[in-house]
Amino acid sequence: MANGKDNLPIHVAIIPDGNRRWASARGMQPWEGHEEGAKITERLVRKALDLGVTHLSFWGSSLDNLTKRPFDEKRALLDIYERYFKKLMESEDIHQNEVHINLIGRWEEQFPESLKKVLRDGLEKTRHYQKRFLNFFLAYNGDDEMLEAVRRIVRRANEYTEITAGVIKENLLTRELPPVDYLIRTGGEPHLSAGFMMWDTANSQLYFSDKNFPDFNEQDFEAAIEEYKERGRRLGQ
């Protein structure tokens, strides 16, 4: 789908891969790559607002990121989240553009109370906004989401006369989000991971960048959007 502004995609999702490789190539600690990735995320959010993208999603962390990574890296990642989300929630860009922030995943099970408070405060401050939508997938895996949706449908089986696409969608964590028009993955590895938004990306256009995420700047994002527009104009021909 497109939003009518020169075939601009309605929903863009980003898998920001390559933070750790970026840091390793520079002899830095993994969390220093995550720190640079957080800075780039801020800049891409601003660029998406400038371009008129109405729905922007980032995969912030998978369940494995939080359960299998070394303790020091996990602790540093959670500290980055607390600082940058607090800054984001207080940003003039968010409030001037009336950006509704969504958090999707098992973050309430995985995050410390101090971070959860920052996130809940931000959700409350933006919950009435409906012009733009900024979605962060935190402690999220797509296969986990789909399995939980199936379990919910089974538990609610007496509510349905048949299982339709609509029934599946309404039981997903992403039930309030539109399908993903454009999925961008950085890091030079052209594949998907852990079933990320598997239902919502079924018909997405895909874009793979060779750059690690901290090097994927506003100009790269805009170039990716321009490529989407050109693909759309071909209309399958």
Image: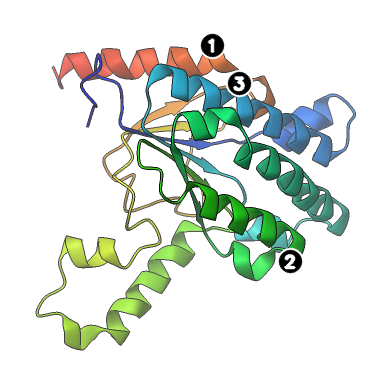
How dense is the environment of label 2, judged by Cα within 10 Å: few (below 14), some, or many (20 and up)?
A: few
Name the mark nearer the viewer: 1 or 2.
Answer: 2
For the N terminus, the quadrant is: top left
Q: Please state if 156 lies on the left or on the right of 138 as rendered.
A: left
The amino acid type, in three-letter code, at marker 1 is: Gln
Residue at image coords 46%, 24%: 48
Quarter-wise, where is residue 148 in the image? bottom left
Q: Nearer the viewer, residue 86 or 135?
A: 86
Color scheme of the displayed model: rainbow
CA separation, marks 3 and 2?
32 Å
Residue 178 in which image quadrant: top left
Q: Nearer the viewer, residue 21 or 215?
A: 215
* Residue 89 position within the rendered picture, expressed as x and y whole percent measured from the top left: 61, 42
Q: Residue at x 18, y 62 (%)?
A: 166
Split into 4 quadrants, where in the image is the C terminus? top left
Upstream in the sequence, badge 3 or badge 2?
Answer: 2
Q: Which mark is residue 113?
A: 2
Asked if residue 106 is positioned above or below residue 178 in the image, the reply reads below
Nearer the viewer's eye, disc 3 or disc 2? 2
152 relative to 210 in the view: left or right = left
Q: What residue sits right under mark 3 in the picture?
A: 216
Viewer can see residue 213: yes
Q: In this image, 28 relative to 153: left or right?
A: right
Report the residue marked by disc 1.
219
Q: Are marks 1 and 3 in contact (CB under 8 Å)?
A: no
Q: Is residue 214 above or below residue 6?
A: below
